[in-house]
């Protein structure tokens, strides 16, 4: 995942997105995006929830809680525009390419130029809107890095089944074991049961991905090491 400096304008929009997300019932599917467009913070989003958020109250709580960060960036106030849509139909996001590293949060180059600064995936996304898929991928590879002899993999996560009744996952790497061996290992050890896995992370404070990226994470536990064997 992208390492976000909390003491930056990019940090503010991503942290604010996750903070707003924390005010929505975790059983709802939600995607919140915050954009810093200069004079205003535009809060866009969709959610299955029917309960409207009091964005001004949430803004005030956020401002008070993270006053030190805002002050360091000389941000005196957050003027917000709320365009969140409620009671939307949003299915679970359980398919996509994920870049996964032994160090879970990686520094990436900043854009050379941008008019607005937007929060970005997986920040602002609820567990079933892709975040759980990302966490599960990190959970799997955190337990196999020493065995597959590479620290970086591009992984295609999917719950779809092929003709052999295996998940149609894909692995791309130019180091370590051959990608087909890595794929076979993953399929042998892990069942891709995101619903079961959610019990490990449902109580996790998502804002800690930004506030404390190097801290302990429930999705980085190593509870399957004894099963990780390559012949």
Image (cartoon, rainbow, N blue to C red):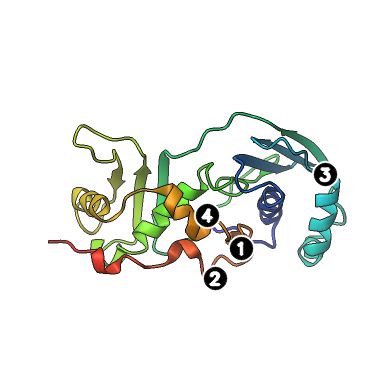
The nearer-to-camera label among 1 and 4 is 1
In x, y percent, where is residue 24?
69, 46
Quadrant housing the C terminus: bottom left
Q: Which residue is mark 4?
A: 2
Which residue occupies the foreground of this view, 228 or 51?
51
Total label count? 4
In the displayed structure image, the side of residue 9 where residue 179 appears, left or right? left
Q: CA distance from mark 1 to mark 3?
A: 23 Å
Q: Secondary structure at mark 4?
A: loop
Q: CA distance from mark 2 to mark 3?
A: 31 Å
The nearer-to-camera label among 3 and 4 is 3
Q: CA distance from mark 1 to mark 4?
A: 14 Å
Question: Tag 4: Cα neighbours inside 10 Å, few (<14), some, or many (≥20)?
Answer: some
In the displayed structure image, the side of residue 159 where residue 32 appears, left or right? right
Q: Residue at x 35, y 57 (%)?
A: 140
Q: CA distance from mark 2 to mark 4?
A: 15 Å
Q: Are marks 3 and 4 in contact (CB under 8 Å)?
A: no
Residue 106: tell me if it is visible.
no
Q: Which residue is mark 2?
A: 215
The disc, 2 or 3, on the residue closer to the chain's N-terminal end is 3
């Amino acid at each position: 995942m992208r390492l976000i400096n909390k003491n930056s304008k990019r940090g503010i929009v991503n942290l604010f997105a996750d903070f707003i997300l924390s005010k929505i019932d975790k059983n709802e599917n939600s995607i919140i995006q915050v954009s810093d467009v200069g004079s205003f913070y535009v809060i866009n989003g969709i959610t299955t929830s029917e309960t409207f958020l009091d964005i001004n109250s949430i803004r005030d709580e956020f401002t008070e809680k993270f006053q030190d960060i805002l002050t360091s960036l000389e941000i005196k106030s957050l003027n917000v525009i709320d365009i969140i849509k409620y009671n939307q139909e949003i299915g679970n996001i359980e398919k996509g390419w994920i870049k996964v590293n032994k160090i879970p949060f990686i520094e990436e180059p900043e854009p050379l130029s941008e008019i607005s600064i937007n929060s970005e995936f997986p920040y602002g996304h609820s567990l079933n809107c892709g975040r759980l898929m990302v966490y599960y991928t990190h959970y799997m590879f955190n337990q196999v890095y020493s065995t597959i002899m590479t620290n970086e993999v591009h992984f295609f996560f999917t719950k779809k089944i092929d003709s052999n009744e295996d998940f149609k996952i894909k692995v791309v790497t130019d180091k370590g074991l051959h990608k087909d061996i890595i794929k076979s290992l993953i399929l042998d050890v892990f069942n891709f049961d995101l619903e079961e896995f959610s019990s490990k992370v449902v109580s996790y404070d998502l804002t800690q991905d930004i506030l404390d990226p190097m801290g302990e994470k429930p999705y980085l536990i190593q509870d399957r090491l004894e099963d990780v064997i390559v012949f």
